[in-house]
Image (cartoon, rainbow, N blue to C red):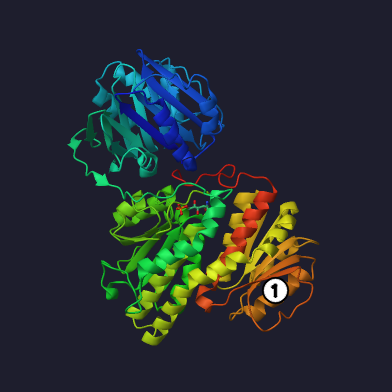
Amino acid sequence: MCGIIGITSNKPVSSAIISSLRKLEYRGYDSAGIATLSNGAINEIKSEGRVDNLEKNPLIKNMLGSVGIGHVRWATHGMPNTINAHPHSSETVSVVHNGIIENSTTLKKYLINKGHKFKSQTDTEVIVHLITEYLKENDLKNSILKMLKQLHGSFALGIIIKDQPDLIVGARRGSPLAVGYGLNENYLGSDSYALKSMTNKISYLSDGEFCIIKKNQVDFFDEIGNKVNKKVLELSSTEENYDKGEFKHFMAKEIEEQPITLKNCVKEYIDNINNDINIHNFPWKLYEINSVTLIGCGSAYNSCLTAKYWFEELTTLDVSVDVASEFRYRINRFKKDTLYIFVSQSGETADTYAALDLCNKNKMKTACIVNVIESSIARDSNFILPIHCGPEIGVASTKAFLGQLFVLYIMALKLAFLKKNITKDNYILKIKDLKQLPKLIKETLLNENKVRSAANTFAKAKGSMFLGRGTSYPIALEGALKLKELSYTHAEGYPAGEMKHGPLALIENGMPVVVLAPRDKYYSKIISNMQEVIARGAKVLLITNKSKDEVVSENIWETIEVENINDDLIPFLLTIPIQKLAYYTALKKGHDIDKPRNLAKSVTVE
Ligand code: AGP
């Protein structure tokens, strides 16, 4: 999860590289660096922390060179500091890298024996010395081929070479890499988002390919050095809104955008005339699908866990869920009649992509639910279901999570109807409720005072718990994840019925506990579980839905009531207060809300 940019042009490139690095910071922000070729030498400038720090270096503004590379880092090997920042350079070569070189220790020993001196603790530096070594006796293409053959692991590379001052080399295995086409200049970037401000014409490298980019020519090669032709895609030129507007943080904006993004989902997927769900060009016959496996990471995994209940309750399909990092190494029993669905906001998450790749290699049916339709996961799935949420910049996923829930729900509902697991009347009723969601979310968003004041307690707590049953259990997991990644304090999501099997011992006087208890079939059970934690001193923040019936329990610290909707859709509304709780807790603690420590928006390494 680092970001790479490269530009070869007929004019100086340093400022264009710096502005692209800003767009790439969502991929990592531990450190940043740039290298250009000018006057027969490599000029390298690097800094710890954000791109702002890099730009403060006085040498940047006079940096010459019409060929250059840049990098923002999320540390895998070696501390996040200036020495370990990319680019890494020798006298003759400079390299930026996203991924992990798994045999770097062995290669480092070999290169040190050859007399190479290492400066950093990174795995990346072996690439610099390897290609420097090969260039002594081979031409460029053969040096690249020899170097790639030696590397084990994943990489997206950008390389500039002192003696080849008009070109950039790019290479891809496992980590995404794109080429952009400009006027008298061409580009290399981790993804289209980094290149979008300069061009909307993009080609994507496939695994094993490398390219040689000049300002007026780009050549692609496969892993044995044969030339390959690449499709040039025209990106959607819809000017997407990448700024915060009047909001303090992208996360705040993206929480408040949810009524709009859900309205987009309704527009894209609900046929108002025929009261039907539009899932066009579904490539399989219904009888070919008897089970579904849902795969994702983080919040995307939590959306899959929520959907498991919907598939179970609405359809007769078998449904299983897995975290991608487990699925990819499990002894999987692949079945032809299973549909494998990959959920990923960025569409670049390495573990999710690897799980998809494994299914593709086993010739399975694959579909993906993504926000970025030009992403690797979208490109390599048999079928794409976009969530239409627009760019999600905040590292903590909010609107994309609700978008994922929406698309997963309509898939379950559509399959239930087509497989005649539900009646037409019930189908139409549920579609009608779906169309209420944007309005109800808008109303729920307004009801934030209690959450805002509760955040003061969570900001001081050394730990908290989130409890739920049924679909509220994965929402409890999501609430705990949001709080962890933003407040940096421990929070645990747990099935309420499980507390008595151990975690009840965690409860101590004054410990904040969120209990998600909509008035569904689990309500009375979870109210009893709530009383068990209150009896042991917990400060319970109860989140339920509006009802004329009073909540039968004493000593509840605070109660928040979300709007009413059918039980299937309650998870959408319960998610709003838990997102705001995490946001206001982090705000209270003065944390960097859009870029929490140690994290990145797109985890493109395993
Ligand atoms: C969510 O708040 C996290 N930032 C993280 O868990 C995220 O959901 C996960 O990394 C998956 O990302 P993806 O949806 O882009 O695949």
Task: Identify the element where label 1 is drawn.
Answer: helix
Q: Is residue 396 visible?
A: no
How many badges with numbers are in the image?
Answer: 1
Asked whether 567 or 236 is in front, the reply is 236
Please, which residue is most extreme toward the front here? 246
| Looking at the image, residue 373 lies above or below residue 110 | below
| Looking at the image, residue 67 lies above or below residue 22 | above
Question: x, y percentage for residue 351?
Answer: 43, 50
The quarter of the displayed image where residue 604 is located: top left
Residue type, label 1 = Asn
Is 578 positioned to the left or the right of 166 in the image? right
Question: x, y percentage for residue 442?
Answer: 54, 67
Question: x, y percentage for residue 309?
Answer: 49, 73
The quarter of the displayed image where residue 82 is located: top right
| Looking at the image, residue 468 lies above or below residue 141 | below
Is 23 positioned to the left or the right of 381 in the image? right
Is 409 positioned to the left or the right of 54 in the image? left
Residue at point 71%, 81% (across, down): 550
Give the residue number, with chain letter if any, for mark 1.
529
The quarter of the displayed image where residue 415 is located: bottom left
Classify 10 Å Cα crowding around label 1: few (below 14), some (14-19), many (20 and above). many
Say whether mark 1 is within 8 Å of ligand 1. no
Asked whether 602 or 243 is in front, the reply is 243
Please, which residue is most extreme toward the top here? 39
Question: x, y percentage for residue 479?
Answer: 60, 60
Residue at point 56%, 44% (across, down): 595
Q: Is residue 283 visible?
A: yes
